Amino acid sequence: MSPMTLAEKILAAHAGLPEVAPGMLIDARVDLVLANDITAPIAIREFEKLGVSRVFDPARIALVPDHFAPNKDIKSAEQCLTMRRFAREQGIVHYYEVGRMGIEHVLLPEQGLVAPGDLVVGADSHTCTYGALGAFATGMGSTDIAVAMATGRVWLKVPETVRIVFTGSLQPWVGGKDLILYTIGQIGVDGARYQAVEFCGPAIDALSMDGRFTMANMAIEAGAKAGLFSPDDKAMAYVAPRVSRPYAACTPDPGARYVRTLEWDVSALEPQVAFPHLPSNVRAVSEAGGVRIDQAVIGSCTNGRWEDLELAARVLRGRRVHSDVRCIIIPGTQEIYRRLAREGLLETFVEAGAAVSTPTCGPCLGGYMGVLAAGERCISTTNRNFVGRMGHPQSEVYLANPAVAAASAVLGRIGSPAELGL
């Protein structure tokens, strides 16, 4: 039997095959199917067309109202109502209502719904986030998700795998967001198109789980089908108190064949900033040129976890948001929100002059809670900065890590924590 990559081993196990190879078309069972308030209504309509009365397993489907929830208008209320009714009719175990929900890709790992070795499909492109746990997780269209909800199976092509090795030790204020922005800057937004990416190396071994979630989340911004980390002691420590069901973790085989291997020493890497209008338009923060900003957004499925907000609080503590800047903080889940309150970070943010929201995707997709007007600029910890992504087509979005976004909110321009003496 040929040695396999991490992606190939997971897909082979779920297809019931001894081995798979890139290019093979497989029919595979899934461990979890995901949809949200934008994509679920479409999937539900397609599900109803199939003539199937019940979902394959109400305990292996997750429905999360997070994009336009709490409802911003009548249309979004109707979207959420469609999903809510379906969840009730089908007895969906993992439906998360407002007040108990979170941003889906932060919430599901937190709730223990994803384990190493899983195959997860979601009607959202950033489903690849769960690769941080050593799962093969990928986004699909709502029609594919409808079939998965009905059958518990998906049809897909086995991707090639790119191996990216990060060596060296990271500088202060540099983390997973900077590693993935640097990666996208190096290979481009289509540099890993329909390929799996395995992230590894000493810098990855030292990276926190929150940093790994951030990197896996943005694998799609390089065109990847999935971004994966081999599950190590950190991943197992994260999973242990959360996942109660059996699972089968996988690791890549020695001698596995990769379509290419890239290796970068990141010891001298600075915090990175992606300029409009592509995540690949990256430069070091020292080369950002002091771009004036109107808004800073700290949150999202990319950087709305505890470590992200704690970094932002370290920068904002004892400082004030610039008088010309709106700073919006969005924790990824209710549990993170509660921890902010328990440990005094909510007070830090409010005292600094920031607004703190209930969990929502909101401004990331130009939904609400921070839509930009023509000519406005925002530095954001989100994952995309396409034309019109956060509002008016003539607005601009700059992507950065939470510490840089917080420092920029204080400075009134794009800048680093080092400029504040940190």
Image: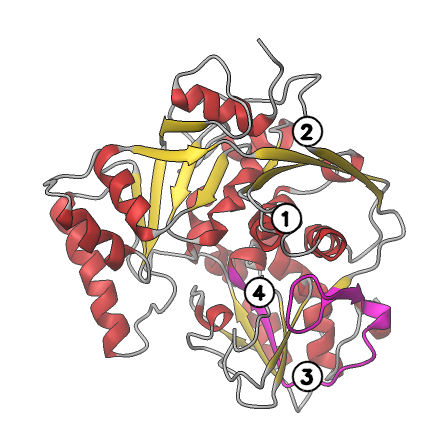
Instruction: Count residues near mark 3 (Cα–Cα under 10 Å), then give few for <14, some for 14-19, many for 20+.
Output: many
Please give left or right for residue 139 compared with residue 252 in the image.
Answer: left
Foreground: disc 2 or disc 1: 2
Q: What distance separates the C-alpha of mark 2 from that of mark 1?
A: 20 Å
Q: Please state the extent of the stretch shown in magenta in the rendering.
A: 273-300
Q: Residue at x 21, y 38 (%)?
A: 150
Q: What distance separates the C-alpha of mark 1 from that of mark 3?
A: 25 Å
Q: What distance separates the C-alpha of mark 4 from that of mark 3?
A: 17 Å
- State the image quarter where residue 312 is shown: bottom right
Q: Is residue 332 above or below residue 200?
A: below
Front-lying residue, 158 or 215: 158
CB contact under 8 Å: marks 4 and 3? no
Task: Assign the N terminus to one quadrant of the image.
Answer: top right
- Number of the label disc, if any, that sits on residue 15: none
Q: Is residue 290 magenta?
A: yes
Q: Amino acid at mark 1?
A: Met
CB contact under 8 Å: marks 2 and 3? no
Q: Residue at x 80, y 70 (%)?
A: 416
- Number of the label disc, if any, that sits on residue 215: 1
Q: Residue at x 71, y 42 (%)?
A: 207
- Label 2: which residue? 258
- Label 3: which residue? 293
- State the image quarter where residue 28 is shown: top left
Q: Secondary structure at mark 3?
A: loop
Q: Is residue 358 magenta?
A: no
Q: Amino acid at mark 3?
A: Ile
Foreground: disc 4 or disc 2: 2
Please give left or right for residue 26 compared with residue 175 in the image.
Answer: left
